[in-house]
Structures are given as structure tokens and as C-alpha cells.
Image: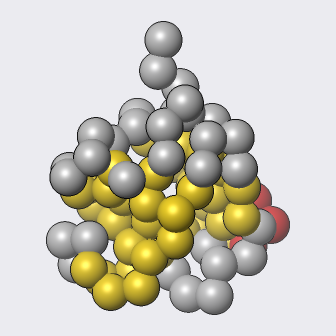
Amino acid sequence: MRRFLCAWSGPTFNGLKGTFRPIDSGQCRWMGFGARSALNQTFEYQRMWTGRNCTGTNILLAPGRSVSNLPSAYVWLGGA
């Protein structure tokens, strides 16, 4: 069973929340909003990006890891 990556529009897991199925390596998906915090509940590494089509600054989230205060809005999700 595949679990989800959860992302919030605000820091400290507040604001608009989105849940996303894991993205396979080499794939890219627009999240629909800028995430400022996230929790990777999947069994796969996931990468979040600031730029269009998974470009720009990125952060790698290991399975079970979270980040509560991203320095800028991350709007794209890709597999690692």
C-alpha cells in the first residue's frame, strides 16, 4: 500500500493541506499551491521544487521525515 506526502501552505503544518501519492523517479507534478511545510509518509524518497516543472531549488524528503518551515514556497513534487 502506498501512503501519502502531506504538504501545507503555511509553516508548522498549518494552512491549506494537500495530500499526494508518491511520485516515481523522473516524474514531476504541480501541487496546486506553494508548500511551506511537509511530511513524507510514503515509503519512497520524494523531492519538492520551487521552480516550474521541477526546476530551481529543491529539498529531498526521506520516508518518514518532515520539514516544518521551508524557506520559500515549494510548488512541484518529483520522485527522487
In the image, residue 24 above or below residue 10: above
Q: Residue at x 26, y 71 (%)?
A: 54
Closest to the observer, 27 or 20: 27
Q: Nearer the viewer, residue 68 or 18?
A: 68
- Which residue appears farthest toward the right when viewing the image? 12
Residue 31 appearing in the image: no
Residue at figure coordinates x 55%, y 33% from the top left: 42
From the viewer's perspective, is residue 43 above or below residue 16? above
Vertical placement of residue 79 versus 41, above or below: below
Establish if 39 lies above or below 52.
above
Q: Position of residue 5 (x, y in %)?
A: 54, 43
Residue depicted at 39% across the width and 73% down the height: 49
Q: Position of residue 62 (x, y in %)?
A: 60, 50
- Lateral position of residue 16 relative to residue 57, left or right: right
Asked where in the image residue 40 lies, by quadrant, the reply is top right
Q: How many numbered discs, if any? A: 0
Residue 56 occupies quadrant: bottom left
- In terms of depth relative to the viewer, which is nearer, 66 or 75? 66
Give the image location of residue 8, x and y in percent: 62, 60
Judged from this view, the residue extending furthest toward the top is: 1
Q: Is residue 40 left or right of residue 31?
A: right
Residue in the image at 46% along x and 51% along y? 46
In the drawing, does residue 11 fall left or right of residue 35?
Answer: right
Is any atom of residue 57 visible in this view?
yes
